[in-house]
Amino acid sequence: MDRPADNLTQAPREADAQTLAPASAPPSSDALDRLLEVLDLRHLEGWGPRGEDDAFRGDSVPGIARRVYGGQVLAQAIISAGRTVPDGRQIHSLHGYFLREGSLDVAIDFAVERLRDGRSFSARRSHAFQHGKPILSMIASFQDDQPGFEHTSPMPDGVPGPTEVRSAFEELAGIDHPAAKFWAEGSAFELRHVGGSLYMGPDAAVREGRPPAHTQMVWMRARRPIAGEDQLLQRALLAFACDQVMLEPVLRTAGKSWMDVGDTVPMASLDHAMWWHRDVRVDEWLLYVQGAASAQGGRALGHARVYREDGTLVASIAQEGMIRLPQD
């Protein structure tokens, strides 16, 4: 008999390619609406790894690159796993690996394995497939809401509020460049970098001849309010949002910008770890306090703490990425 782990790799056959085509419904004109649409996964009955019904299908949102954005697949994997846990249990941690690039014009299938349901915790493993091959593998843990000892690392003092920081929408408005147009018009989230962004150039210190910063802080929120109190969706959206900034502290430390990423500085996410400490709403301002712990061997590690505007810590994140920086 096959082990469950072996069966989990039974993805749709290549002959079923026509069933993998994205839905024909026209996308919403609003970037956040489009994102919410692709997170509303379609259930696939009878296609589970062991004959269960724990399988789902989703499409992709457009991005800057000609491949699926990793944060989107991660958010969809969270939704797929969360739909199989007992009511009331919320995701509190995940560990995921980005295995292959995803294609934007092919739907993504998600197979969920129910690893354990205990009295308070549930564990799930979710694989994302395209063309019969996994592009993401994630394991996540869910917990009932329970009382317990409370402690939180404080938010840094003296941080300018979001209304005191320039928005990427303002900074990039009117610039005739595909990336600038995406960040200003096509992004589901608004970003405000404390001390300046890396969109069009390196850290301000580099431009002034000083050593670059090795940390950064970014205010972020969804473009508009999101209806409802669905914490699974809110936490999945947080995972989606954070992936776009997790390696920025490495670029900042190296004196590089997003204009360098590509042929000059190849960069891609390798893995992602995340812990949710408290309920979160991504349509309210959140402060990402970030750093770059290490860079070596063509890899770098970024980390972040995420705070509400009132100083409450809601999540901690770490991500390692492939980033090939010149040694100078």
Image (cartoon, rainbow, N blue to C red):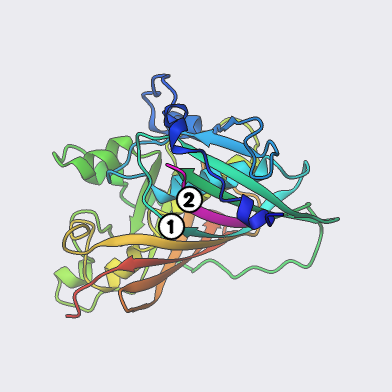
Q: Is residue 274 left or right of residue 25?
A: right
At label 1, the amino acid type is: Leu
Q: Is residue 96 above or below residue 254?
A: above
Q: What is the quadrant of residue 295 in the picture? A: bottom left
Disc 2 residue type?
A: Pro
Measure how far apart labels 1 and 2 are at the Cα level.
7 Å
In this view, the residue farthest toward the front is 1
Left/right placement of residue 111 relative to residue 294 reads right
Residue drawn where x is 61% and y is 38% of the image: 55
Q: Secondary structure at mark 1?
A: loop
Q: Secondary structure at mark 2?
A: strand
Residue 237: mark: none
- The one nearer the camera, 21 or 174, is 21
Q: Is residue 140 within the magenta segment?
A: no
Whole-percent x and y of residue 161?
Answer: 43, 54
Query: Which of the 4 image quarters holds residue 17?
Result: top left
Disc on res. 99:
1
- Which residue is nearer to you in this view: 123 or 35? 123
| Contact flag, marks 1 and 2 (Cβ < 8 Å) | yes
In this picture, which residue range is highlighted in magenta?
Answer: 131-139
Mark 1 vs mark 2: which is more N-terminal? 1
User: Can residue 135 be found in the magenta stretch?
Assistant: yes
Residue 49 occupies which quadrant of the picture? Answer: top right
Residue highlighted by disc 2: 134
Q: Quadrant of the N terminus?
A: bottom right
The percent coordinates of residue 100 (x first, y second) are: 39, 54
Q: Provide the major secondary structure of the magenta segment.
A: strand
